[in-house]
Every structure is written in C-alpha cells, then in structure tokens.
Image (cartoon, rainbow, N blue to C red):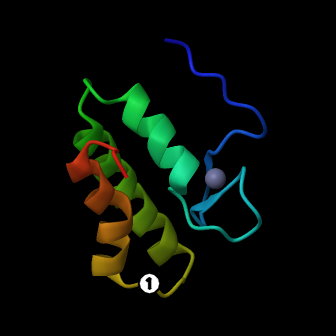
Amino acid sequence: MAVTVSGPAHDYLRPDWTCGGCPSGTPWPCSPARVEYGERYRDLGLTVVMRNLLDLAAKDLANSGQIFDPSELHDRFMAWTRTGGQR
Ligand SMILES: [Zn+2]
C-alpha cells in the first residue's frame, strides 16, 4: 500500500514550474510527479487539483515575463490526467 519514494521530492519550484527533484530545468510535472499526484489525488479530483495548479502556473509564468504556449502548458498539466495517471 505504502509507496516508498527515495531521493528528492518531485515538487514544483515557483515561479518557473520546474521540478525540484529532477535535473535543473525539467518541466513540472515530470513522470515521477505525475505518478505521485496520480496516486495521491486519484479519488479526490486529480483534474481539479491540476486545473488549479495550471492556473497558478500560467499566472506565475506571465507575471515573471516568461514566454509560454498556453495550449502546450495545458497539455503538460492536463493531458495525462485523463488516463488516470496510467502513463
Ligand atoms: Zn521530478
């Protein structure tokens, strides 16, 4: 039941939304983060959680003057949640 995760936590770093547990500059959510969030929020509205984080990320990136593609950002945060974190 309990999943042992070794190594650094795969948490997002604001305002760049890169992963704190992956090599520098890796976009969050990385694969381990997707697995972790998928398991943590599977029955608690994963899409709602990711939707909120997506909004937050878009604001952070815009406020810090970074150039990003909104549809790309949307896919990055939302596309994988539709499969229930299976991939
Ligand atoms: Zn990571």
Q: Is residue 80 above or below residue 27?
A: above
Q: Which three-letter amino acid code belongs to the residue tagged 1? A: Phe
User: For this view, does 58 lie left or right of residue 4?
Assistant: left
Around disc 1, counting alpha carbons within 10 Å, would you say few (fewer than 14), some (14 to 19), or many (20 or more)?
few
- Which residue is depicted at the point 53% across and 46% down? 33
Q: Position of residue 47 (x, y in %)?
A: 24, 44
* Helix, strand or loop for disc 1: loop
Number of numbered markers: 1
User: For this view, does 34 lie left or right of residue 77?
Assistant: right
- Which residue is depicted at the point 76% across and 67% down? 24
- Which residue is depicted at the point 72% across and 50% down? 21
Image quarter of residue 39: top left
Image quarter of residue 23: bottom right
Q: Label 1 CB, ligand 1: below 8 Å?
A: no
In front: 76, or 62?
76
- Which residue is depicted at the point 67% across and 29% down? 5
Q: Position of residue 38 (x, y in %)?
A: 38, 37
User: For this view, does 6 lie left or right of residue 33?
Assistant: right
Please name the residue that numbered disc 1 is placed on.
68
Q: Position of residue 40 (x, y in %)?
A: 42, 27
Q: Position of residue 46 (x, y in %)?
A: 29, 38
